[in-house]
Image (cartoon, grey):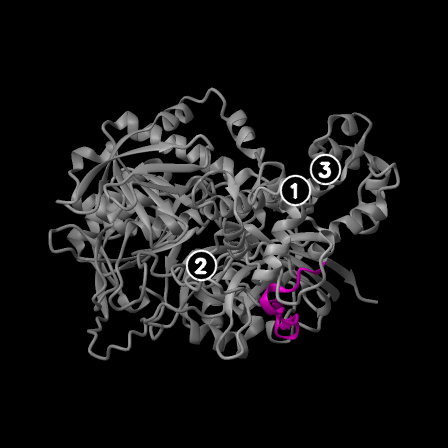
């Protein structure tokens, strides 16, 4: 067997009842419509990473999918299909499997609530276990799966034809002559097929990392091993880590697999490779993978991951609205979601994009979904941004649903017993919901018995700050709407008010009164009144949202808004692209909790920083960022429809921050994924220019960074095309202040932000003070 991780998976879950349940399997009903509900037998394969189910198709009686392809599971009738095609009494028997391809999901119904719970629990454990595997092990998974797909007759052998198919699966283009030569070199038994040790030998040659070998040999001064002191020298010299000998010993105990070497405090090459592929060898500082920032500061001192029109899964005109969109956003760490509320025809308030053809979803169902998923990824507070267009009776229903569903998690009274003068902290608000919306009176009325009327009028133009640009000139405009006291009283720390200018806000606006600005207004203010905008955000919250003209749900660049200290920079989470890459990167650190502490100069009122001229000032701590792109591993095929297509990869490195720091540099592209020179040399074959597996560049760049605390670094791998736009292979983005120096592996994500388990970059990075 090529891979040992299957046994380790079983070992971790050994004796687990849910795992045994999955291995036994059972009958589930696959739900597609009211009339199309078919019973199928599902079970987990012995490899603990493949789900099998029977099929009625005569040409394909057995079908499988990989546990690794599962993004998440939903217990209950949460999908639109299950809500539409199953009876409410089946709530506890239903569940959905969502795949990383966001357009695919599987709606299922079990025989009992207990069976459904065990299916969901068991699969969640397997998914969690897969995600905890090292990058090295995930790489082996990928290669093993490619081998399995190439083994068409499932005899655990590889013929020449299957070998050629396998090579194309892993992005290696080999002409027939060379494929035959490679095959003959490995077929020691002369049987016409590779099996057992021959496949293992081929696998070892194929995955050999010459660049790792060179690095290991340089520091392995103890009979081919690294002693703890050798490893410490490597950490101090190459990785620039400020550590002692004890840390080197800890790494050996953590990653060395050879017990004899471990007992003598030595590290083998395999142990070194394990270290390089785990979090200690990754580009992201492992300390930043958990919450490491001060979470006790006022709420407005943080950038807050925020979604615009959260209910939409596509465009702003005809796209569907769904509770699933809220779940996805919350599971990605979003801490501020938007609810556009309108009167429903059945007497129940609904959420949709008003004056458009987008579908509608019940307000009550959205609140239930938010309650269930708000704190699965992060325990820090969630802000519900209400855009209220409802009549008073349905506003009262909104208030009732939020109170009854969210319960004590809903903040309805101030945290302090006296009139507050500043925001509470995320730490104080753990597990809580805040409501952003209109309020009939000031917050001090809570402490003064100055009760507001049961119903009163408020300006509708403030519902989203400025009225949204819909491009619909026929949209009716109302100067006032009636606001129910029950809904008004739920708004405490995020009272929506019209933006009347920075001087007006300074003189008349309380700290808890916040404005929402459309992107064009916000960018204009950043250009013309940068210092005032920055100081405004030092004690107040500001929300930015995309222009209404973005009917395709495209996004604006969030970085300039973060540069001015804006906290709630709302984006269309359903739309992929550079903007969402940057948003995911901004909130990658601090444990991905959805809150990132702003730099001190954006929190200190004595700061004289001007966002429009950030390359000058006392806060300046210029750095030189050195990047060497060395190699890539197991890049996926972009065009899977073309059987013989091979990636021509290039790597682009971008720094995104203040204007003076924005820069982009790229490597040359490599035809047909490079050459297989080193591999061919190990086979004793001459070089052939059209074959490759792990492309290598060894190209270096330098970036002068004026304000590192605001800078993001983005790595992109693209498939070069001379006739059209390059295709994205993978990307990864993170704050520059979270980058580890030295030789590091960079994981790659899909355009939707999902990890490509097998792929990555190998780079050398150095962030140094300038003289």
Left or right: 107 as drawn, with respect to 235: left
- Disc marking residue 271: 3
The picture quadrant where one finds residue 22 is top left
Q: Is residue 6 left or right of residue 57?
A: right
User: Can residue 294 be spotted in the picture?
Assistant: no
Q: Residue at x 84, y 36 (%)?
A: 227
In this view, 753 is above or below 119: below
**In the drawing, what numbered circle is on residue 510?**
2
What label does residue 188 carry, if any?
A: 1
Q: Residue at x 63, y 53 (%)?
A: 182
Q: Where is residue 762, by image quadrant?
A: bottom right
Left or right: residue 679 versus residue 312 is: right
Q: Is residue 283 magenta?
A: no
Q: Which of the two labelled residues, at mark 3 and mark 1, occupies the earlier sequence position?
A: 1
Q: Which numbered disc flags the more N-terminal residue, 1 or 2?
A: 1
Which residue occupies the foreground of this view, 406 or 306? 306
Residue at image x 43%, y 75%? 521
Numbered range of the magenta stretch: 649-677
Q: Distance of mark 3 from mark 1, alpha carbons?
A: 29 Å
Residue 1 percent across, percent down from the top left: 57, 34
Position of residue 415 in the picture relative to residue 237 (left or right): left
Considering depth in this image, is 632 or 277 the residue closer to the camera? 632
Q: Position of residue 346 (x, y in %)?
A: 11, 51
Which numbered disc, 1 or 2, marks the residue closer to the eye? 1
Report x, y in % for residue 756: 52, 52
């Amino acid at each position: 067997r090529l891979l040992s991780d299957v046994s380790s998976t079983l070992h971790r879950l050994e004796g687990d009842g849910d795992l045994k349940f999955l291995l036994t399997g059972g009958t589930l009903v696959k739900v597609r419509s009211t009339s199309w509900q078919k019973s199928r037998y599902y079970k987990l394969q012995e490899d603990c990473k493949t789900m099998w189910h029977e099929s009625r198709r005569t040409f394909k009686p057995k079908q499988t999918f990989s546990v690794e392809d599962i993004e998440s599971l939903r217990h209950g009738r949460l999908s639109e299909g299950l809500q539409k095609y199953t009876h409410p009494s089946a709530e506890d028997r239903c569940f959905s499997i969502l795949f990383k391809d966001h357009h695919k999901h599987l709606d299922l119904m079990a025989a009992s609530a207990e069976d459904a719970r065990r299916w969901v629990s068991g699969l969640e454990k397997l998914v969690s276990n897969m995600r905890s595997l090292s990058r090295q092990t995930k790489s082996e998974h990928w290669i093993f799966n490619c081998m399995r797909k190439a083994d068409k007759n499932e005899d655990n052998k590889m013929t020449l034809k299957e070998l050629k198919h396998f090579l194309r699966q892993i992005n290696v283009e080999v002409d027939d002559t060379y494929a035959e030569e490679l095959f003959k070199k490995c077929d020691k038994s002369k049987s016409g097929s590779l099996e057992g040790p021959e496949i293992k030998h081929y696998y070892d040659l194929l995955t050999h990392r010459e660049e790792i070998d060179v690095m290991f040999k340089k520091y392995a001064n103890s009979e081919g091993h690294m002693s703890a002191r050798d490893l410490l020298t490597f950490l101090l010299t190459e990785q620039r880590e400020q550590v002692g000998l004890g840390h080197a010993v800890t790494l050996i105990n953590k990653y060395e697999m050879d017990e004899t070497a471990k007992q003598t405090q030595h590290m083998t090459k395999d142990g070194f490779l394990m270290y390089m592929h785990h979090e200690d060898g990754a580009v992201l500082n492992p300390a930043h993978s958990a919450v490491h920032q001060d979470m006790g500061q006022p709420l407005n001192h943080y950038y807050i991951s925020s979604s615009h029109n959260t209910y939409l899964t596509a465009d702003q005109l005809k796209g569907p609205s769904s509770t699933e969109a809220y779940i996805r956003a919350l599971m990605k760490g979003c801490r501020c979601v938007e609810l556009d509320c309108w009167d429903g025809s059945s007497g129940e308030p609904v959420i949709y994009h008003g004056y458009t053809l987008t579908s509608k979803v019940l307000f009550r169902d959205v609140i239930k979904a938010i309650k269930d998923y708000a704190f699965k990824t992060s325990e820090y507070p969630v802000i519900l941004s209400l855009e209220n267009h409802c009549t008073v009776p349905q506003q009262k229903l909104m208030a009732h649903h939020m109170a009854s569903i969210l319960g004590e998690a809903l903040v309805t009274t101030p945290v302090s017993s006296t009139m507050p003068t500043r925001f509470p902290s995320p730490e104080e608000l753990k597990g809580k919901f805040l409501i952003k919306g209109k309020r009939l009176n000031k917050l001090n009325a809570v402490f003064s018995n100055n009760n507001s009327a049961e119903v009163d009028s408020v300006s509708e133009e403030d519902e989203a700050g400025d009225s949204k640009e819909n491009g619909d000139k026929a949209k009716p405009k109302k100067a006032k709407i009636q606001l129910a006291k029950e809904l008004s009283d739920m708004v405490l720390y995020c009272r929506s008010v019209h933006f009347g200018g920075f001087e007006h806000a300074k003189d008349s606006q309380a700290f808890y009164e916040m404005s929402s600005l459309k992107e064009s207004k916000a960018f204009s203010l950043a250009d013309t009144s940068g210092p005032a905008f920055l100081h405004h955000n030092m004690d107040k919250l500001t929300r930015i949202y995309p222009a209404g003209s973005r009917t395709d749900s495209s996004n604006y660049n969030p970085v300039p808004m973060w540069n001015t200290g804006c906290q709630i920079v709302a984006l269309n989470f359903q739309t992929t692209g550079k903007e969402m890459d940057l948003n995911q990167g901004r909130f990658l650190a601090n444990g991905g909790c959805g809150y990132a502490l702003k730099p001190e100069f954006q929190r200190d009122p004595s700061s004289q920083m001007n966002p429009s001229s950030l390359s000058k000032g006392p806060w300046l701590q210029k750095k030189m960022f050195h990047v060497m792109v060395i190699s890539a591993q197991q890049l996926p095929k972009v065009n899977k429809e073309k059987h013989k297509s091979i990636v021509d990869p290039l790597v682009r490195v971008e720094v995104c921050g203040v204007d003076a720091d924005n820069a982009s540099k790229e490597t040359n592209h490599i035809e047909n994924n490079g050459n297989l020179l080193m591999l061919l040399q190990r086979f004793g074959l001459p070089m052939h220019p059209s074959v490759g597996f792990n492309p290598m560049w060894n190209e270096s760049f330098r970036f002068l960074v004026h304000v590192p605390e605001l800078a993001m670094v983005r790595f992109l791998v693209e498939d070069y095309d001379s006739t059209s736009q390059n295709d994205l292979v993978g990307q990864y983005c993170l704050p520059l202040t979270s980058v580890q120096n030295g030789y590091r592996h960079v994981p790659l994500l899909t355009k939707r932000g999902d990890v490509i388990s097998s792929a990555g970059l190998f780079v050398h990075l150095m962030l140094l003070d300038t003289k």
